[in-house]
Amino acid sequence: MPAAYEQYLVPVVFRPFAEDLAARAAALHPRRILELAAGTGALTAGLLAALPSADVTATDLNEAMVAFGSARAPGAVWRRADGQRLPFPDGSFDLVVCQFGVMFFADRVAAFTEVGRVLATGGRFLFNTWGPLETHGFEVALQAGLERAFPVDPPGFFRTVPHGYADPALVTADLAAAGLAVEDEQELTLAGRAASTADLATGYLTGTPVRAAVEAHDDGPAVRAAVIEEMTARLGPGPVTATMTAHVFRAAARAGLSATRPGS
């Protein structure tokens, strides 16, 4: 799964936003950076290039992603870690960053509390989340393809997980509950470009959790064909371009509050 994710999705969907987040990180001049949910290292590589003198620690819960990412961005220290229970001392980092990862935390307040705990005084938390599914041109077409391929009970992963944390007010409230205050929040729309619809569909169907639903289907090739046909009808055969909208947040510990791990 990491290889397909890296080959077909990172250049199209994730790299444009990684470049933006790395530039925002560089403007803060951190010396010690922790990245959560680093995946295959798209943002990690950008951080290393934008901040060559910084110490970057990249983490992910998925061991396969850590193995892949450590080979792709060896300039960082890679560790397997649960964002809801970080294995680092209090005040270890000047900046915590996360690209499209906070949506996957089962307990976001717990994860944000951990972020506050490992941030040094004056540190910042910089991350992004996807907007609603309807604001992501590629994934609207993908979801339509999945609904065509699975007329009964289609996979709802993209609507409920990647795009399931799209309300900035909810994100701000969760940060506040963890002792963090939003300093800046921006809506950002960027364009992605894929060589072909078939490549894009391959990335989504083999490099994301919907892979399990495709593999469990009686006729996986038919699923892939139906998804490609629907996506092509909506986007064209390729090269294809679509816009994608995200929200970018910068937060800091609220004055007078210390975010600590429950029970510590």
Image: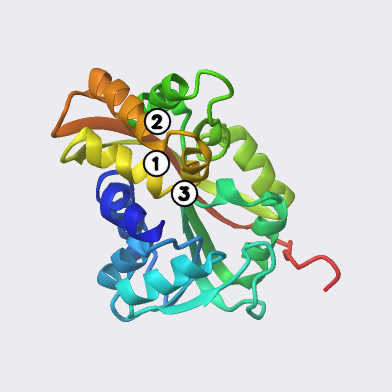
**Alpha carbon of mark 2 to alpha carbon of mark 3: how far?**
27 Å
**Alpha carbon of mark 2 to alpha carbon of mark 1: how far?**
9 Å
Element assignment for label 2: helix
Structural crowding at the residue carrying mark 1, measured as other residues with C-alpha within 10 Å and reported as few (<14), some (14–19) or many (≥20) = many
Q: Are marks 2 and 1 in contact (CB under 8 Å)?
A: yes
Q: Nearer the viewer, residue 47 or 40?
A: 40
Q: Nearer the viewer, residue 195 or 53?
A: 195
Q: Which mark is residue 205?
A: 1
Q: Position of residue 72 (x, y in %)?
A: 31, 71
Left or right: 2 with respect to 236? right
Type of amino acid at the residue the image marks with label 3: Phe
Relative to residue 56, is residue 202 depicted above or below? above
Q: Residue at x 62, y 63 (%)?
A: 83
Q: Residue at x 43, y 33 (%)?
A: 219
The image quadrant that residue 44 belongs to is: bottom left
* Residue named by callout 3: 100
**Alpha carbon of mark 1 to alpha carbon of mark 3: how far?**
19 Å
Q: Residue at x 44, y 61 (%)?
A: 39
Q: Nearer the viewer, residue 93 or 70?
A: 70
Q: Position of residue 122 (x, y in %)?
A: 55, 68
* Residue named by callout 2: 223
Q: Upstream in the sequence, badge 1 or badge 3?
A: 3
Q: Residue furthest right?
A: 263
Q: Residue at x 65, y 71 (%)?
A: 86
Type of amino acid at the residue the image marks with label 1: Leu
